[in-house]
Image (cartoon, rainbow, N blue to C red):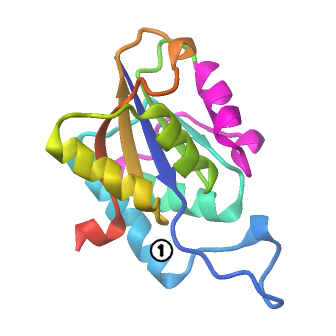
Amino acid sequence: MKRLLLLRHAKTEDINKDTPADRERVLTERGRRDAPRIGRAMDVKGYLPDLVLCSPSTRTRQTLELAAAEFGDNVPTRFVEEIYDARASELIALIRDVPAEVARLLLVGHNPGFEDVARTLVKKSVDPETRALAAMLKEKFPTCALAVVDFDIEDWSDIAPLTGELRDFTRPKDLD
């Protein structure tokens, strides 16, 4: 079994004439508050990754740093340029290249790619709880939300659309 954790970056300043370039936007006070909370939730729920692949943007790095301080910051981490502004197909290709010995993979990145990849990979469920989580995910993948998707595969290269089981979808507002 493989577990994919998709963490969207925490809340950032809006883009306007006074903000830096998109890649350099920093977390807001809310974002700096939410990221450690989601990291604590990951720790409590046992969602500890074996490997982290993170977009190199400032906001994703900050999100990861704050979250990882809660779940364990000694996880091998790679900053991957391709995650920034990636479409679902590009993210899936990146996931397929992860070594088979990695059982739990955390990606830290951006929308719309993360929302699209989650929708692409998650299969429909008959379980009412899972359907409720999927409905929330389908409605919106907000900042600092975490989707947890399990796959009954031995190798990441076998990942395919509509084969993942949505195990959890945690939003910062769920932690209040």
Q: Which residues are magenta?
A: 70-98
Tell me the residue at 67%/33% (across/down). Answer: 89
Instruction: Give percent across and percent down for residue 26.
Output: 65, 74
Instruction: Give percent across and percent down for residue 148.
Output: 36, 40
Looking at this view, name the residue that lies furthest to the top: 154
Circle 1 — which element? helix
In this rendering, the answer to whether 56 lies above or below 37 is above
In this rendering, the answer to whether 28 lies above or below 10 is below
Determine if residue 145 is in view: no
Q: Going by the image, does 91 lie left or right of 6?
A: right
Q: Going by the image, does 91 lie left or right of 108?
A: right
Instruction: Give percent across and percent down for residue 169.
Output: 32, 51
Q: Quadrant of residue 168?
A: top left
Tell me the residue at 75%/40% (across/down). Answer: 82
- The amino acid on which the numbered mark 1 sits, given as a three-letter code, is Arg
Q: Going by the image, does 89 lie left or right of 120?
A: right
**Count the marks: how many?**
1
**Is 48 covered by the magenta stretch?**
no
Give whichever of 44, 14 is nearer the camera.
14
Instruction: Give percent across and percent down for residue 176.
Output: 23, 74
Tell me the residue at 35%/62% (across/down). Answer: 171
Determine if residue 38 is in view: yes
Looking at this view, name the residue that lies furthest to the left: 128
Q: Identify residue for label 1.
A: 32
Which image quadrant: the N terminus? top left
Looking at this view, name the residue that lies furthest to the bottom: 18
Q: Quadrant of residue 60?
A: bottom right
Give whichever of 108, 86 is nearer the camera.
86
In this rendering, the answer to whether 66 lies above or below 100 is below
**Is 95 covered by the magenta stretch?**
yes
Tell me the residue at 41%/35% (across/down). Answer: 122
